[in-house]
Image: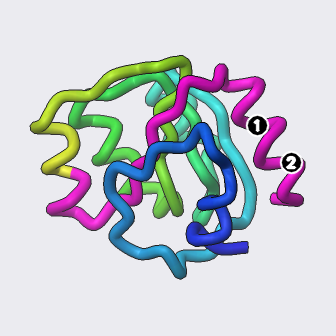
């Protein structure tokens, strides 16, 4: 599955899609950055509520396919611009982490 296949989820707001053909290999849910760095895997979607610049850095380090900010978490323009600069795919959603994961499972990710 690829990032462009997520466009069917109506509650996803695609803020920055730098590479819609990026492969998705799974999902990782977590907000503790040290835990995410230790356990996240390449090409996973990262679901979180964190929206500071270190999130972008961890996403790059782990080579995640996408960051999804859930639970109506907001991010500032600096965060969005950093995602654009680093070509990090960014999606915002009102879904909880659980409901977001359910939608992704429904798509067979």
Q: Is residue 109 left or right of residue 61?
A: right
Task: Find the magenta span and give its range.
Answer: 83-109
Q: Residue at x 53, y 81 (%)?
A: 21
Whether the residues at callouts 2 and 1 have beta carbons within 8 Å, the answer is yes
Q: Quadrant of the C terminus?
A: bottom right
Q: Residue at x 67, y 69 (%)?
A: 5
Q: Which residue is mark 2?
A: 105
Say whether residue 89 is magenta: yes
Q: Quadrant of residue 36?
A: top right
Q: Residue at x 30, y 45 (%)?
A: 56
Element type where label 2 sits in the image: helix
Local crowd size for mark 2, using a 10 Å CA cut-off: few (<14), some (14–19), many (≥20): few
| Residue displayed at 68% across by 58% down | 8
Residue 108, compared with residue 31, is above or below; it is below
Q: Is residue 97 above or below residue 60?
A: above
Residue at the bottom extreme of this rendering: 21
Q: On the rendered structure, is 58 left or right of 84?
A: right
Image check: 58 left or right of 99? left
Mark 1: give few (<14), some (14-19) or many (20+) Cα within 10 Å: some
Residue 52 % position (x, y): 25, 28
* Res. 13 mark: none
State the separation of the CA atoms marked 2 and 1. 6 Å
Residue 75: x %, y % from top left: 27, 28
Which of 62 and 21 lies nearest the eye of the viewer?
21
Q: Residue 25 vs residue 53: left or right?
A: right
Disc 1 target residue: 101
């Amino acid at each position: 599955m690829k990032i462009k296949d997520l466009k069917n989820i109506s509650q996803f707001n695609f803020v920055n899609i730098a590479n819609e053909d990026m492969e998705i290999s799974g999902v990782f849910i977590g907000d503790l950055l040290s835990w995410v760095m230790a356990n996240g895997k390449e090409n996973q979607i990262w679901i979180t509520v964190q929206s500071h610049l270190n999130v972008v850095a961890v996403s790059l380090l782990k080579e995640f396919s996408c960051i999804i900010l859930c639970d109506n978490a907001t991010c500032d323009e600096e965060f969005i611009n950093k995602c654009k600069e680093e070509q990090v795919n960014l999606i915002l959603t009102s879904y909880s982490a659980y409901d977001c994961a359910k939608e992704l499972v429904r798509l067979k990710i």
